[in-house]
Amino acid sequence: MLDIIRPGDDRYPLVRHVYSAEGSPAAVVRPRVPAEVPEALAFARQEGGPFSVRSGGHGISSISTNVGGTVIDLGALSTIERIDDRVVEVGPGARWGRVASTLRPWGLAISSGDSGDVGVGGLATTGGIGLMGRKHGLTIDSLVGADIVTADGVVRTLSPTDEPDLFWAVRGAGANFGIVTGFRFRASTDASVVHASFAYAIADTAGFLERWGATVESAPRSISAFLYLFGGAQPFAQATVVFAGTDTDAAVRALEPFTRIGQVVGRRAEATAYADVLPTSGAVHSGQQTAVTRTGLAVHLDRRISRSLASLTRGGEADMIQLRSVGGAINDVPSSATAYAHRHQNFSVTAVSMNGLQSLDAAWQESRELMDGLYLSFESGHAPERVEDAFPPETLDRLRRLKAHWDPDGIFDQNFAIDRVASA
Ligand SMILES: Cc1cc2nc3c(=O)[nH]c(=O)nc-3n(C[C@H](O)[C@H](O)[C@H](O)COP(=O)(O)OP(=O)(O)OC[C@H]3O[C@@H](n4cnc5c(N)ncnc54)[C@H](O)[C@@H]3O)c2cc1C
């Protein structure tokens, strides 16, 4: 019998909300094993009303809870197993911090994001821009197979040779095609890294951003670098720079240019485990982070983009700008190889308004026009036009045909719905 948590159940307060929103679903279904997911889907369809799929509950678009509907919560599907020398099988409900710490004694690691609390399911169906991305690609680039429950309630095994079209679609647009119940990743052997942090006081924000961009692009691909820029009267930035590998001399050489970008007011570097790089709180979700975010991808942080981003923090519309490196190995993958098709950009750019300022939208417009594509996982808005930013025309065309075939009734339309066209 399905485990269904309803209002009044002692466990309901623990499962009703997500990280970025409060919710009050009528039922939260918690499959205990992947084989219960088709039954959970049938239950949700029978109940009708709003429907959400949840893995880690850290989705920025706040759709993994709802009001009055059904949530399929995959949190209990969190096993992590080594099934071959470098291949690991991971449940969607595992969080990336635990994945990293479980893989560590095996001498393995998978580049994921910058938070250990993020769930495997949401990130590994969309992309996965991580702190070893320039060396090892997106998280989806490590994916060698998956299991999915499609709209017809059938469990399907996906790989480059089993349902290859669906496997292609799941790597970037997974939420539109079903519920992924298991992921098989080929992990890297970079379980050890050099982890550096820099704090910069900034006099000229636009100039600083241009230098940051040039430094990241010319760094060896062992380096992946995330920058968190804050405005206000005294602008400053914090950077997390990871050198994937154990060659500390090479790491020192690769990190040195980051000391010349601006006034360094704090710095630290240590050889450590990749697992120690990801902060993990394990906090119960209560809708604790209701930030509004607007996002895009950029090829270079050129003068126009840098000035535009600087003005966002200067004017206070954005409390923070996050810049995550892509490029390197991410761009070695042909853009037609996965539904995430953005394989020539070097930066993911996200503007964050912590208190949800509506003025962010208007202020972001100038930056948006300078962007080249979008990674869906950093967008808190739900505007349907963002689907066209996320998927270039050829990719979107293929996705629309596959959507018509695999999800003809639009069951999985919650997360930036891809509209259906008649199959050719
Ligand atoms: C603090 C923070 C830091 C982040 N840092 C990064 C980062 O550095 N790099 C990066 O790439 N991303 C990052 N993200 C974004 C993150 O990848 C997405 O928010 C992701 O969707 C969260 O996954 P989840 O399973 O926790 O989310 P959930 O809220 O559980 O799911 C989000 C959505 O994904 C879909 N989904 C979830 N599980 C499945 C499944 N099993 N099958 C099909 N669809 C599913 C559903 O539509 C669901 O509504 C960050 C997010 C936060 C909040």
Image (spheres, rainbow, N blue to C red):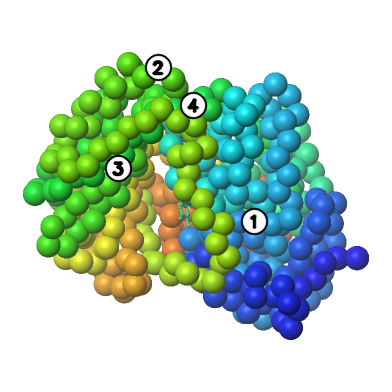
Residue labelled 1 has its Cβ within 8 Å of some atom of ligand 1 = yes
Which residue does the numbered mark 4 point to in the structure image?
192
Q: Earlier in the sequence, mark 3 or mark 4?
A: 4
Q: Pointer 3 and pointer 4: residues touching (CB < 8 Å)?
A: no
Helix, strand or loop status at disc 2: loop
Judge whether 402 appears above or below 73 on screen. Answer: above
User: Closer to the camera, 109 or 70?
Assistant: 109
Q: State whether residue 202 appears in this view.
A: yes
Residue labelled 4 has its Cβ within 8 Å of some atom of ligand 1 = no
Instruction: Say which residue appears at 51% left-offset and 25% top-offset.
Output: 190
Judge whether 259 appears above or below 384 on screen. Answer: above
How far apart in space, not on screen, are marks 3 and 4 (Cα)?
19 Å
User: Callout 3 environment at 10 Å: few (<14), some (14 to 19), or many (20+)?
Assistant: many
Mark 1 or 4, which is nearer the eye? 4
Q: Earlier in the sequence, mark 2 or mark 4?
A: 4
How far apart in space, not on screen, are marks 2 and 3 (Cα)?
21 Å
Mark 3 or 4, which is nearer the eye? 4
Instruction: Say which residue appears at 29% left-offset and 42% top-offset.
Output: 239
How far apart in space, not on screen, are marks 2 and 1 (Cα)?
36 Å
Q: Pointer 1 and pointer 4: residues touching (CB < 8 Å)?
A: no
How far apart in space, not on screen, are marks 1 and 3 (Cα)?
28 Å
Q: Quadrant of residue 310?
A: bottom left
Tell me the amino acid under the disc marked 2.
Answer: Asp
Residue at the farthest left position? 203
Which residue does the numbered mark 2 point to in the structure image?
247
Which residue does the numbered mark 1 point to in the structure image?
55
Q: Quadrant of residue 292?
A: bottom left
Q: Quadrant of the N terminus?
A: bottom right
In the image, taking residue 356 as reference, residue 32 lies left or right, namely right
